[in-house]
Image (cartoon, rainbow, N blue to C red):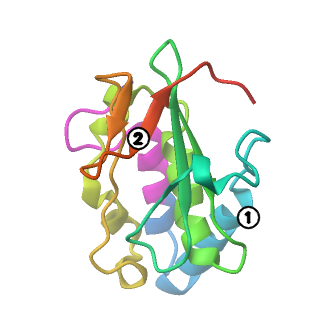
C-alpha cells in the first residue's frame, strides 16, 4: 500500500498514531526511544562527515546521507550526537518511517507531517526536505549534492 499525495505512508501513519495515543507528557519519552533506535552510520560514513550533508535548520549538529539504489529504493543515514536526544529522536522517526521506501513515495510525504506527532514545541517552524530520484544527483540550491544513486551496502 502506498500513500497518496499529502498523506503519510503506513509506517509514518503508525508512528504518528503511536504519538497520538500517548499523553503529552509521554511523547517526549517516545521520542527518546526513537533516539536510542537510530542505527549507527555504516563504516563508509563513520568519521567522514564531509561525505554527509549537514541539516542547517537544526540547532544541534545533524548530518544526513541519502542513497538511492539501482531499484530506486532510498536509504537514509543520519549522524546526530547522543547529547542531542530530541534531534536524534526525530532522525530516528525519519529513518523508521522513510528508509527503504521508493523516492516517489518519500516525496509524497507532506513536509508538515511532524505536526501530527504533537511535538511542535520542539521544532518550531521546521520542515523536512527529501531527495528525488529524477536525476543521478539531487542538489540543493547551493549546488551541493544531497543524494547519489549508488549500490546499497551495509
Q: List x then y, in percent, for residue 75.
A: 56, 34
The residue range painted magenta reads: 3-17
Ranked by sequence position, the earlier of labels 1 and 2 is 1
Query: Vertically, is 7 above or below 136?
Result: below
Q: Is residue 10 above or below residue 23?
A: above
15 within the magenta span? yes
**Residue with the most extreme left position:** 5
Residue furthest right as drawn? 43
- Dot 1 falls on a residue whose secondary structure is helix
Residue at the image position 65 percent from the left and 73 percent from the top: 32
52 or 74: nearer the eye? 52
* Residue that carries the numbered disc 2 in the rendered image: 145
Q: Which mark is residue 110?
A: none
Q: Residue 107 in magenta?
A: no
Q: How far apart, in angstroms, are the residues tagged by discs 1 and 2?
A: 28 Å
Find the residue positioned furthest to the top: 71
Q: Label 1, on which residue?
A: 36
Amino acid at each position: 500500500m502506498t500513500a497518496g499525495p499529502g498523506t503519510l505512508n503506513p509506517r509514518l501513519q503508525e508512528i504518528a498514531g503511536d504519538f497520538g495515543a500517548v499523553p503529552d507528557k509521554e511523547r517526549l519519552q517516545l521520542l527518546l526511544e526513537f533516539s536510542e533506535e537510530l542505527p549507527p552510520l555504516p563504516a563508509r560514513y563513520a568519521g567522514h562527515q564531509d561525505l554527509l550533508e549537514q541539516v542547517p535548520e537544526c540547532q544541534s549538529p545533524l548530518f544526513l546521507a541519502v542513497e538511492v539504489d539501482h531499484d530506486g529504493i532510498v536509504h537514509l543515514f543520519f549522524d546526530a550526537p547522543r547529547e542531542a536526544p530530541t534531534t536524534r529522536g526525530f532522525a530516528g522517526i525519519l529513518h523508521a518511517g522513510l528508509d527503504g521506501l521508493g523516492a516517489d513515495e518519500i516525496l509524497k510525504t507532506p513536509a508538515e507531517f511532524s505536526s501530527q506527532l504533537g511535538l511542535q514545541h520542539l521544532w518550531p517552524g521546521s520542515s523536512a526536505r527529501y531527495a528525488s530520484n529524477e536525476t543521478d544527483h539531487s542538489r540543493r540550491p547551493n549546488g551541493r549534492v544531497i543524494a547519489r544513486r549508488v549500490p546499497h551496502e551495509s
